[in-house]
Amino acid sequence: MTEAGQNTAPPIDILQNSHSNISSDTEFTDITSQSLRTTQTELSSVSRMAATTATTAYSADMDLQKKYLLHRPNIAAEMEKWYAMTDRYGFIDEDFTEPTEKQKQREVDRATKWAGMVKEKQIDGTHDFTFSNKLVKRVYKGIPDCWRRDVWYYLCTDQLQQTKRDYTLKARYATLLHQTTSNERQIDLDIPRTMHGHIMFRQRYGSGQCALFNVLRAFAGYDEEVGYCQGMANVVAMLLMYCEDEKAFLLLVHMFERDNLHDLFIPGFPALMESFYIQEKLLLCLAPSLANHLSRIGLTSDMFATRWYITLFTGGVVRYQTLLRIWDLYFLNGFDIFYCTAVALLMNQKDNLLKCDLESALAFLGGTLFVPEDQIIKLIKRLYEKTRNHNYISNFKRQYKQSISL
C-alpha cells in the first residue's frame, strides 16, 4: 500500500468549482485522485482567464438563475408522470416490487417506537429526542423513513445543542438566494446528471432540480473557499429527499462544521488524501491478506475510493437502502464511520477481490456493490467499535500528519 507523502502527483485541484466537467452521477466511476489534480500553472492560467471574463460570466449567471426562478414547476404533474414506475424511495426501478403487508406493518411499528422517544417538539417543528442506548441501538437497526429528517438533524447538531445560529443561517440562506456566484454554470451542468433515476430530479427545471440548484449555489456563496465541488450535488440531493431546501442548507452547514467537510472539498483535498491513508492502514490491520493482495496487484485507494469519500458514498457505491443505513450511522458517529464502511465493503467482497488483477479489481470496485444490508451494517458496527477500542483511527491520523510535515 502507498504510504502518505509518496504520491508525486501535484496536489492541486482540477475538480474544484468550475474547473471540472465530470458528472456528479453517471461518470463518478471514472474519478480517481489523479483526476482531481492539475498543476499550479494550469490553475493560475484558469484564474487569469476567469478574471478577464467576469462581467460576461456574471450576466450569464443571472440569465441562468432566471431559468430556475421563472420556471413554475407543476409538482403534482411531475409526480404523476413517473410515480407508478418508482420503488418505495422514489427511484425508477423496473424490478420494483411492492412491500408486503408484513413489511409495511413492521415499518409502522418501528415508526411508533421512535415517536415514543420524542421528548418535545420545538417551535420550528424540529423534534427533540431522549438520547439513550435504546436510541443508539435503533439507529443501527435503521431509522424509519418518516423520522430520518428530524433524527439526522438531531444527531448532526449534537442533540440540538448546535442550533443556536440556525435563525441567522436561515436569514443568510434567504440573502444568498438573491446573489450570484461563479459556480452556477458548473452546478447547472451537473444537476441533470445528479440522481437522475429519482423521480424528484428527473424533470428539467422541476421542483427537485430547482431546490438542488438553490442549495448548492447558496452554499457556494456561504463557503467561498469550497465553492462548489463534484460530489456535493449528490450529497445535497440526498438531503433534499428528506428535507425542504432551507433545512437541507442548514443540515449541510452543520455537516461541514461537525465533520470538517471543508477539508474534503477544498483545493488539494487534504481530508481525502488523509482518508486514503487511514483506509489502507485500517485494511492492513483488519484484513492483512486482502491488503497485501491489493498491494501486489498495484491497487491503491486513490484509484477507486475517490468517489466513495467525495460523495459520502452517495455516488452509486451501494444500493440506496443500504446507503440510507450507512448515513444513519454517519449522523450518529461522524465521518470516521466512512473509513469503517470502506474497509467493511472490501472485506465483504474479499473472495471476489482475491481473484482479481488490477484491471478487473478497478472495474469491480468502480460499480455498485451489492452487499447484504444487515450483514454489512453489523460488520461496520463491529469494525467501528474495534477501531475505537484500539484508537486505530486517531493514531493513523496522527501518523499521517507527521508524515506530511516531514
Image: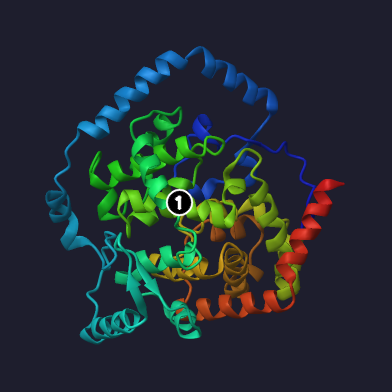
Q: Check the image and tell me how it is coloured.
A: rainbow
Q: How many marks?
A: 1
| 406 left or right of 124 in image | right
Looking at the picture, tell me which residue is in the foreground, 363 or 226: 226
**Measured from the top left, where is residue 398 in percent x and y?**
78, 59
Extreme residue in the right direction: 406
**Taking the image as drawn, is residue 299 in sight?**
no
Q: Describe residue 79's horizontal placement relative to residue 319 as left or right.
A: left
Placement of the N terminus among the 4 image quadrants: bottom right
* Residue beneath the point at 26% across and 63% down: 94
Give the residue at x 32% y 49%: 245
Does residue 242 appear in this view? yes
Name the residue nearer the viewer: 278 or 289: 278
Q: Is residue 132 left or right of residue 245?
A: right
Residue 181 percent coordinates (x, y)? 43, 29
Q: Residues within 10 Å of mark 1 (few under 14, many from 20)?
A: few
Q: Residue at x 25, y 54 (%)?
A: 199
Q: Position of residue 75 (x, y in %)?
A: 16, 49
At mark 1, the secondary structure is loop
Q: Quadrant of residue 190?
A: top left
- Residue that badge 1 annotates: 165
- Which quadrant would residue 285 be assigned to in this image? bottom right
Q: Amino acid at mark 1?
A: Arg
**Image height of 366 relative to 382, above or below:** above
Q: Position of residue 335 (x, y in %)?
A: 58, 62
Quadrant in which residue 321 is drawn: bottom left
